[in-house]
Image (cartoon, rainbow, N blue to C red):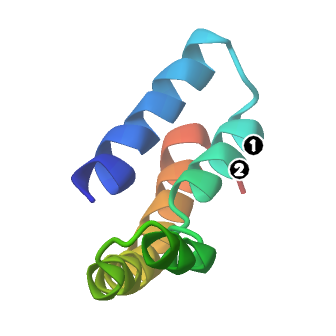
Amino acid sequence: MVGKFLINPFAVVFAALALNADPLLIQVALNFEALPTDVATTRSPKKMQGDQPLMAAIITMQTLLSFIMLALTLLLGQVAFCVN
């Protein structure tokens, strides 16, 4: 989950800055990056004979963390990129 909520947003920002993207576009990309895993992924372990309760727990944790991360990325977009 560290990669999902810490490494990926920084990669999006660096890529967008390297491409000289619009600040609003950077904020939209950050918001998409802070979203949790799709709930439909709980069916994959069942079909592939994996650990379905573990996947459900991971999705639950990502959803709970995304409440905080979405707020932080909105704040980051407003402060760092001057987007109102």
72 lies left or right of 16: left
Q: Quadrant of residue 45?
A: bottom left
Q: Quadrant of the N terminus?
A: bottom left
- Residue 73: x, y in percent? 49, 59
Q: Amino acid at mark 1?
A: Leu
- Gap in Å between the C-alphas at discs 1 and 2? 6 Å
Name the residue at 57% across, 49% down. 30
Q: Amino acid at mark 2?
A: Val
Q: Secondary structure at mark 1?
A: helix
Asked whether the beta carbons under mark 1 and mark 2 sit within 8 Å of each other, the answer is yes
Q: Residues within 10 Å of mark 1 (few under 14, many from 20)?
A: some
**Viewer-proximal residue, 58 or 65?**
58
Q: Quadrant of residue 7?
A: top left
Q: Secondary structure at mark 2?
A: helix
**Viewer-proximal residue, 42 or 79?**
42
Q: Say the numbered circle drawn on residue 24.
A: 1
**Viewer-proximal residue, 18 or 78?**
18
Q: Quadrant of residue 61?
A: bottom left
Q: Say the numbered circle drawn on residue 4.
A: none
7 lies left or right of 15: left
Name the residue at 37% across, 52% down. 4
Which tag is nearer the camera, tag 1 or tag 2?
2
Name the residue at 44% across, 81% down. 63
- Residue 56: x, y in percent? 38, 85
Q: To which residue does mark 2 refer?
A: 28
The total of numbered circles placed on residues is 2
